[in-house]
Structures are given as structure tokens and as C-alpha cells.
Image (spheres, grey):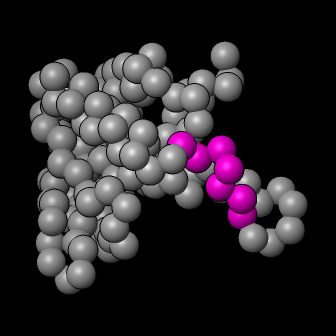
């Protein structure tokens, strides 16, 4: 499982011109599910998203998590995180999980984040989405907990 985690002041997601989800301060997380990912990867990535200390405390140090700040998460499915462009100019997506299984694991991550007490909103799995976000920092963290990285 791979994720791009971005700290934001706000974000909104729309499909076909209709707003589907909006959050205030928190995280936009682009989540890719790889072949072989399962419950273990879902647990690790959801726990990391909720507890990663990338928000500033009163002293200006990144010492608080989205859970600590009462922020929200906008979770966006993003199979293109598994795009391999090392050969040629057209990425290969053979390491991305098949849609049915990927959607199940994506929703599992959503549910695990919610179970941590963090507000979580989602995009529409497999849809062509437009995301507007106001980055904060910017702070961008790359997470790679792919099953094949053990």
C-alpha cells in the first residue's frame, strides 16, 4: 500500500462538477493499493495516517497528529501511485491491485481511520475526480507499506 499524505488548510473533491466531499484543516491522503496488500497493510497505513505528527504545536514544532488537532482526512483512491515509468514513457500499472479488491481495502482503511476517532471523507472509487486543496506548509509525506516490501 502506498500513500501520499499532504497537510492542508482545506480541500474539496468533486465528480462531474458536483461536490462530493469537503474537509477543513487536516490531511488529503492519496491511497494506492498494490497486488498482495491485505489487512496488515490497511492497519499499518491507517494507524500511521492518524498518528503521524506533522502538525505544529504551540512552539512551532511538528509534534501533533491529525487526531490531536481534531482535523479531518480526505481519502482518495489513487491506483496511479503504482505506475512504473522506469521503462518507456507510458507507465505500467501491473503492481496495482485489481479494482474490486482495491476498493474493499480502500474502504477498510477508511473504516479504520474512522475507528481511531478521526473524521474521514472519501472520493468516489474509480471516478474521474477533481480535487481542490490548499496545502499547508507544504508538508507532503510518502508512505510505502507495500506487501512486497517486507
Tell whether position 94 is magenta: yes
Q: Is residue 140 visible?
A: no
Give the residue at x 31% y 32%: 109
Name the residue: 45% across, 17% down.
40
Q: Was residue 60 drawn as part of the magenta stretch in this picture?
A: no
Tell me the residue at 16%/60% (across/down).
21
Q: Please state the horizontal and vertical placement of residue 82, each as a whole percent of the image.
A: 62, 49
Q: Position of residue 52 (x, y in %)?
A: 38, 26
- Which stretch is magenta? 91-97
On screen, residue 96 versus residue 109, left or right, reads right
Res 45 visible: yes
Where residue 46 appears, as percent x and y from the top left, is 34, 27
Q: Where is 82 relative to 11, above or below? A: above
Which image quarter is the C terminus in? top right
Among the 4 quarters of the image, the one containing residue 36: top right
Vertical placement of 76 versus 35: above or below? below
Task: Determine the main secondary structure of the stretch shown in magenta.
Answer: loop
Left or right of 5 on screen, residue 125: left
- Rendering coords of residue 131 (x, y %): 32, 68
Q: Is residue 72 above or below residue 129?
A: above
37 or 53: nearer the eye? Answer: 37
Residue shown at 37% from the left, 61% from the top: 126
Specify the farthest residue to the bottom. Answer: 17
How many circles with numbers are drawn on the protein? 0
Amino acid at each position: 500500500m502506498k500513500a501520499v499524505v499532504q497537510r492542508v488548510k482545506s480541500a474539496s473533491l468533486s465528480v462531474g462538477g458536483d461536490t462530493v466531499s469537503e474537509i477543513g484543516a487536516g490531511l488529503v491522503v492519496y491511497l494506492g493499493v498494490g497486488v498482495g496488500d491485505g489487512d496488515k497493510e490497511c492497519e499499518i497505513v491507517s494507524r500511521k495516517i492518524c498518528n503521524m505528527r506533522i502538525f505544529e504545536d504551540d512552539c512551532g514544532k511538528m509534534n501533533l497528529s491529525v487526531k490531536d488537532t481534531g482535523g479531518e482526512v480526505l481519502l482518495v483512491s489513487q491506483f496511479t501511485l503504482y505506475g512504473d515509468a522506469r521503462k518507456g514513457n507510458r507507465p505500467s500499472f501491473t503492481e496495482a491491485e485489481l479494482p474490486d479488491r482495491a476498493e474493499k481495502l480502500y474502504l477498510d482503511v477508511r473504516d479504520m481511520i474512522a475507528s481511531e476517532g478521526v473524521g474521514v471523507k472519501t472520493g468516489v472509487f474509480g471516478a474521474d475526480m477533481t480535487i481542490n486543496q490548499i496545502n499547508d506548509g507544504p508538508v507532503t509525506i510518502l508512505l510505502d507499506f507495500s506487501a512486497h516490501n517486507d
